[in-house]
Image (cartoon, rainbow, N blue to C red):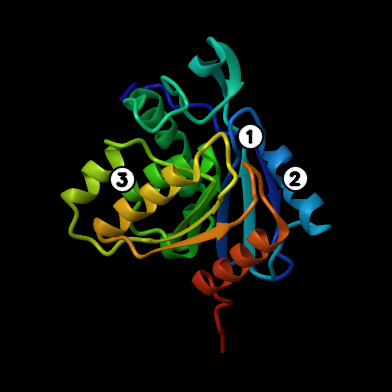
Amino acid sequence: FGMAAPAALQRSVVSPAGRHTASLIFLHGSGDTGQGARTWIKQILNQDMAFQHIKVIYPTAPARPYTPMRGALSTVWFDRYKISNDVPEHIESIDSMCRGLTDLINDEIKNGIAKNRILVGGFSMGGGMAMHLAYRFHQDLAGVFALSSFLNKDSAVYQALKKNQNVLPELFQCHGTADELVLYSWGEETNKMLKSLGVSTSLHTFPNLNHELNRTEIEELKTWIVKKLPVEVTD
């Protein structure tokens, strides 16, 4: 690990309407920003994805050279050799970003939020990033969600879970059957692998949905979020 701390990630935040007792980190897809992901969801729902007690954080990945774009700079969580589940992972960039995102988790803990009251997830590459973050480094988080996402065939996530004894965060996964960028079969295979390694998983299938989000999916996600992060009853 290099000694220099990475610069804090820029973020767009939707504050809870009431007392803040839980946090949600939503990781955007490649080339997007935290603000962009927030706006996209807002357009689909006609309002922010907001909660009474949960703070929603949309960080932005720093721009870096991205190999599938011939090395052009893009806001990506990590590099890929290509957009395929059949190539090795670019583990250096994944692990470096896990450190930056760990700082974000620690910021919430410093604000008095327990680790088991924090959810991570995202769209496409953001969901892949969240699976690395939670299943390799933060197995005590409340849960993970992955929308139109996948892990490579020999993912470091699978290697870590083969050696694991802990109770793992539940995975909520969604994927459109018409996805032409991240094939539905890649998402399905990821789900089956994680299930076989002891993760409690669900896979919500959306017929005719391409590489995008829709309203039903976000409504189902919101229901799951509140199930995993219920309002705390105080006396």
Is 211 on the left or on the right of 189, as rendered? Answer: right
What residue is pinned by disc 2? 40
Q: Earlier in the sequence, mark 1 or mark 3?
A: 1
Of the residues under marks 3 and 2, which one precedes in the sequence? 2
Answer few, some or many: residues within 10 Å of disc 2's Cα (few below 14, many 20 plus, some between 14 and 19).
some
Q: Residue at x 69, y 42 (%)?
A: 37
Q: Give the number of the disc on residue 136.
A: 3
Neighbor class of circle 3 (other Cα within 10 Å; few <14, some 14-19, many 20+) is some
List x then y, in percent, for residue 54: 62, 64
Verify CB contact (< 8 Å) between mark 1 and mark 2.
no
**In 3D space, how far apart are the residues under numbered discs 1 and 3 (Cα atoms)?**
24 Å
- Identify the residue at image location x=81%, y=50%: 43
Mark 3 residue element: helix
79 relative position to 62: left or right: left
Q: Is residue 149 above or below residue 142?
A: above
Q: Picture quarter containing residue 50?
A: bottom right
Q: Name the residue under label 1.
A: 10
As helix, strand or loop, the secondary structure at mark 2 comes to helix
Number of other residues with Cα within 10 Å of mark 1, as a class: few under 14, some 14 to 19, many 20 or more = some
Comparing labels 3 and 2, the label whose residue is closer to the camera: 2
| Tag 3 near tag 2, CB within 8 Å | no
Q: What residue type is labelled 2?
A: Trp
- The reply to whether dot 1 and dot 3 touch (C-beta < 8 Å) is no
Quadrant where the image shows the C terminus: bottom right
- Whole-angstrom CA distance, mark 1 to mark 2, is 18 Å
- How far from the left and from the top, in percent, is residue 172? 48, 60
Q: Name the kind of residue labelled 1 in the image.
A: Gln
